[in-house]
Every structure is written in C-alpha cells, then in structure tokens.
Image (spheres, grey):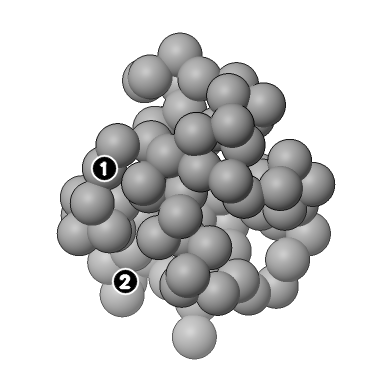
Amino acid sequence: MQLNEAVSKRLSEFMQAKDMTQYQLFMKSGVPKSTISNIINCTYPSMKLRVIHELCQGLGVSIIEFFNSPLFEEDNLEP
C-alpha cells in the first residue's frame, strides 16, 4: 500500500469512529474541504506533515495516535 493510501484509510477510520463528516473536520481543523477530499480520495501522492497535524487537532488526536496503526508498519508500505 502507498503511504497516501494508508493516511487516507487512517483518516477515514478516525472520522468514522467520531461520526464526523468532511465538513465537520474542515470546521474543526481549518484544513480546506477540497484538501480533505483529496486526501480521502488519494489524489495527493504526498502531503505535508503540517496538514496531517492540523487534521489531528481537528480530530482531537495526537500525531503519535494517528500513526500508531498497523497501516504504517514498514511491511505494509510500498517503498
């Protein structure tokens, strides 16, 4: 799996767990809706850590918690 796919899946997991829409995440994080949509749809080959940090703030989770997932283990990511 590509890194952007792992980020997309992890973001979707948190949004679903918190019953949060893309619009609600935009309102809480300040990250534009189009950027959130692009991340969810894997249309960004890469993204800035700053954006992930802002999304984490909107979700109410730490960056450590965000990346603490088997999705980000080296064996699961393509080089």
Compare residues 31 and 18 and report the one nearer the observer. Answer: 31
Q: What's the amino acid at mark 1?
A: Val
Marking on residue 75: 2
Marking on residue 53: none
Compare residues 57 and 71 and report the one nearer the observer. Answer: 57
Above or below, 77 relative to 71: below
The residue indicated by pointer 1 is: 61
Q: What's the amino acid at mark 2?
A: Asp
The picture quadrant where one finds residue 58 is top left
Which residue extends farthest bottom? 79
In the image: residue 20, left or right of residue 40 = left
Task: Estimate the x, y position of residue 42 in percent, counting from the top left.
Answer: 71, 55
Task: Estimate the x, y position of residue 11 in percent, counting from the top left.
Answer: 47, 42
- Density class for disc 2 (Cα within 10 Å; few <14, some 14-19, many ≥20) is few
Residue occupying the point 70% across, 73% down: 45
Query: Which one is earlier in the sequence, the residue at label 2 or at label 1?
Result: 1
The picture quadrant where one finds residue 33 is top right
Residue occupying the point 46% across, 72% down: 49
Q: Label 2's element?
A: helix
Mark in front: 2 vs 1: 1
CA gap, disc 2 and disc 1:
25 Å
Above or below, 21 relative to 70: above
Task: Estimate the x, y position of residue 61 in percent, counting from the top left.
Answer: 26, 42
